[in-house]
Every structure is written in structure tokens, then in C-alpha cells.
Image (cartoon, rainbow, N blue to C red):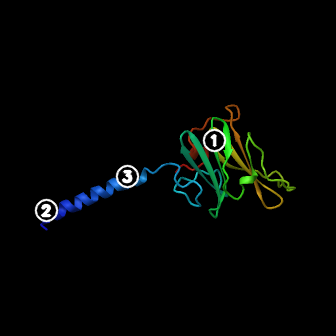
Amino acid sequence: MSKSSFRRAICASLIAMGIAGTAVSAAPLNEGLGQAWPNAQDVSANGHWHVYVFANNGIHYIQVNDTSGNVRVAFGTAGGQFLVLPMGRDAQRVSTPQQSSAADTTAVPLTSYTETVYKDGDIQLDAVPMSDGTTRFSVSPLTTTSLVSPCDNPAECNGHLN
């Protein structure tokens, strides 16, 4: 192989790798839903949780993992409606405006200790540790009157800007 043919082959390989790299980085946004460490930005509101947001066909899916990567809850939301997905350790302990928590227990919330896990311009997700060691989650829509200032960027709302 001549020197110029070798250079052309190297250039063609580098161009092909660049194109392949671009295709990989444009993976669908919902890829990784349900995984311990999905390939998505962590937009949690505090360090006790990892929150990932996926979008598909106008529906936003929010997944909450604990610090060990265990999926705790996941739900979909669109137009003020919420649907809890049947995945995660606490799937039975999520309440939304459309459904209350399905877990029947005598546990009580620990004294006024509620963490905001995720918040954007449309919703807020809170976690409440319970006396039996479990965690209850509550998701609610935000109205314009409940916001001090509107927030269009979840990373900005949750303090994850670099």
C-alpha cells in the first residue's frame, strides 16, 4: 500500500468513526428507563437521590434511584396527569393527584422531614421517610401561583448547572 493510499484509508476511518460517534450520541431520550445507572443527566434536587427524566411522544417519564442505583419509583406525566409505572422498590408508595399510595401500612411520617426530590416548572416530587424505614413519594403539579419564579430548565431549578 502506498503512503497516500494509507493516508486516505486513515482519513476515511477517522471520518467513519466521527459519523458513528455522532449517531451514538443521538440515542433516543427514553433509552435507559428502569436501569440503575441510565445514560441520562441526574437532575435531582438533593444528594440523597438520583433523578432521571426521559421523554417520548410528549410524555415525560421521571425515574428516582437511591444513591446505590436502586430504582425506587418511576412515573409518567403529561398535561397535568400522572401515571405511576410498576417498577421500583417504592412503586406502591407513590401518591399522585389521580391516585393515592397503594401501600397499606400503619407507619407514620417522621416528624416534618420532607425532601424535595425533583422540581421543574410543572411538577414537584417529595419524599417522606416513614417510621417503618420505608419512603413515601408524593408528586403534584405546580401552578403558576405556587412558583416564586418560573423555571424552564430542570437543571437550573435543581441547582445542577456548572
Relative to the observer, which residue lies in front, 1 or 85?
A: 85
Instruction: Say which residue label 2 marks.
Output: 4
Instruction: Say which residue label 3 marks.
Output: 22
> Secondary structure under badge 1?
strand
> Secondary structure under badge 2?
helix
* Earlier residue among tags 2 and 1: 2
Residue at x-position 23% and y-position 62%? 10
Instruction: Say which residue label 1 marks.
Output: 77
Q: Is residue 111 left or right of residue 162?
A: right
Residue at x-position 64% and y-position 38%? 122
Residue 19 percent across, percent down from the top left = 33, 53
The amino acid beneath tag 3 is Thr
Tell me the crowding category of disc 2: few under 14, some 14 to 19, or many 20 or more residues within 10 angstroms, Cα based: few
Question: What is the quadrant of the N terminus in the image?
Answer: bottom left
The amino acid beneath tag 2 is Ser
> Secondary structure under badge 3?
helix
Tell me the crowding category of disc 3: few under 14, some 14 to 19, or many 20 or more residues within 10 angstroms, Cα based: few
Please count the marks in the image.
Answer: 3
Q: Quadrant of residue 99?
A: top right
Q: CA distance from mark 2 to mark 1?
A: 57 Å
Do tag 2 and tag 1 residues touch (Cβ < 8 Å)? no
